[in-house]
Amino acid sequence: MHVCKIHVIAPLLLLSGLAVPVQARAGGAELLLWQDVVDLVEGHPVTDKTMALQALAVSELSEAKQYPNPKIGVGVGYGDPTGGGSGKVVWDLELTVPLEWIAERKHLKQQAEKGIEAAGYEGEALGLVVLLELRRMFVTIAHDEMLLASLEASEQHMSEFVATIKMKADVGDLRKVELTRVEIELAKVRLVSEKALIAASAHRARLDLWLGGKLPDDFKVDFHVLALPDVPTLEEAMDDVSSGHPLLKAGALKVEAAAAGVKAQKHAAFPEMAIGGFVEQELDVAKYGGLFTMSLPLWSWNKAGVDKAEAEKLEVESEEALVLLMLGSRVLAAHSDASQANAAAVQYRDEILPRARLAVEDVQKAYDEGDADLIDLIDARRTLVSTQIEYAGVLLELHLAVADLEILTGGGVS
């Protein structure tokens, strides 16, 4: 596993709350695009599972297309003439070809063909699950980079502030206890930064693990965290999920496959028939001719097989309804999360964060003029830092919820 170095992009600067453009990122780290992640996912275990599902479905079609083998019967014995005389060996040979499969074959073939299509959509759904997980990691890393930049700027400003307070304390303009207060605040900011750095390293290692260790040691993700994505209306999202998700398409095909299976089992209820020929050598005569056989359905008309097929059809129909319910519920939850996060992000961007920044400026000016205490300034700075962290968290919630919506409605992530 590579040890990934942490870099920051689109930072929320301490006093402005504005993002640094992607083109202005410093350092020699490689820029990781979302398309790069998509390209690197080839070879993921889910690909093998998808291929296995498809291969299984294809094998079932091959089985349905197979012709049954003919049956051969051989009898050998010894015969004694009823009127006396020497006996000799007698034998008979018969060859039959079954016919009942002809009626079943059409429906079994249709069942297998629908199964292949369903397996394709199931593989697509598995791919979307992986794609969503990777997108969540990608967005989280971008959030880490922004948060670390914000905390780094906060730490730098706090360090400069501590140095200023120390100079005043050294010449007796301030009490030592006031220096201790600002040093504690600086230690708290550094602690938050260390925790964020550890989490960011873990997030990068996890993405690298999912991509098979293919990421460079040193990279920055290309994602504009501060750009608010569009949130579709709930009606649009619900319409999309009911028509576009591959699991629902797979479910509909499974229902069709199960219906074909019921028809195949009903045809299997008819008596088994076969045609063929025979050759028979008796004591004094050789016989040969055609042969037709048919089973005598005294005990069973394949009721058990039909009942099982109908139960399987009922099962896949209920699964289809359950999947639709599950996806609809997840869309409702994701849309609620996205709408709430979007409203909060706008509020933080347009009102809360500018007011927190302005409060620091006002208290700093009042402190410089002797109209505010040091504790007021510390509190204003602490509020600004916590507001920036909260804003970053809201942005992460928004981007993750929108990614969920895009996947749940059957699309990729933009």
Image (spheres, rainbow, N blue to C red):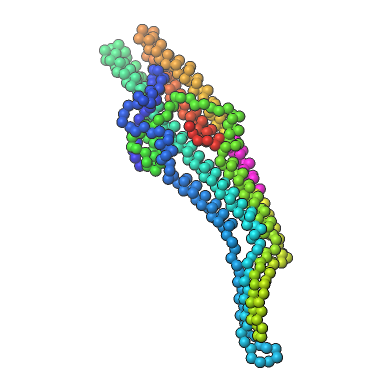
Which secondary structure type mostly characterizes the magenta part of the structure? Answer: helix
Q: What x and y, as percent, mark residue 193?
A: 37, 28
Tell me which residue sits at (62%, 55%) in the image.
108
Segment tinted magenta in the rendering: 314-329
Tell me which residue sits at (39%, 25%) in the image.
10
Tell me which residue sits at (42%, 16%) in the image.
357
Residue 134, quarter of the rendered image = top left
Above or below, comparing residue 154 to residue 42 in the picture: above
Above or below, comparing residue 253 to residue 398 in the picture: below
Above or below, comparing residue 19 to residue 171 in the picture: below
Between residues 265 and 346, which one lies in front from this camera angle? Answer: 265
Tell me which residue sits at (38%, 26%) in the image.
22
Left or right placement of residue 296 versus residue 31 in this view: right
Q: What x and y, as percent, mark residue 50?
A: 50, 47
Residue 321 among those drawn in magenta: yes
Between residues 286 and 249, which one lies in front from this camera angle? Answer: 286
Residue 394 among those drawn in magenta: no
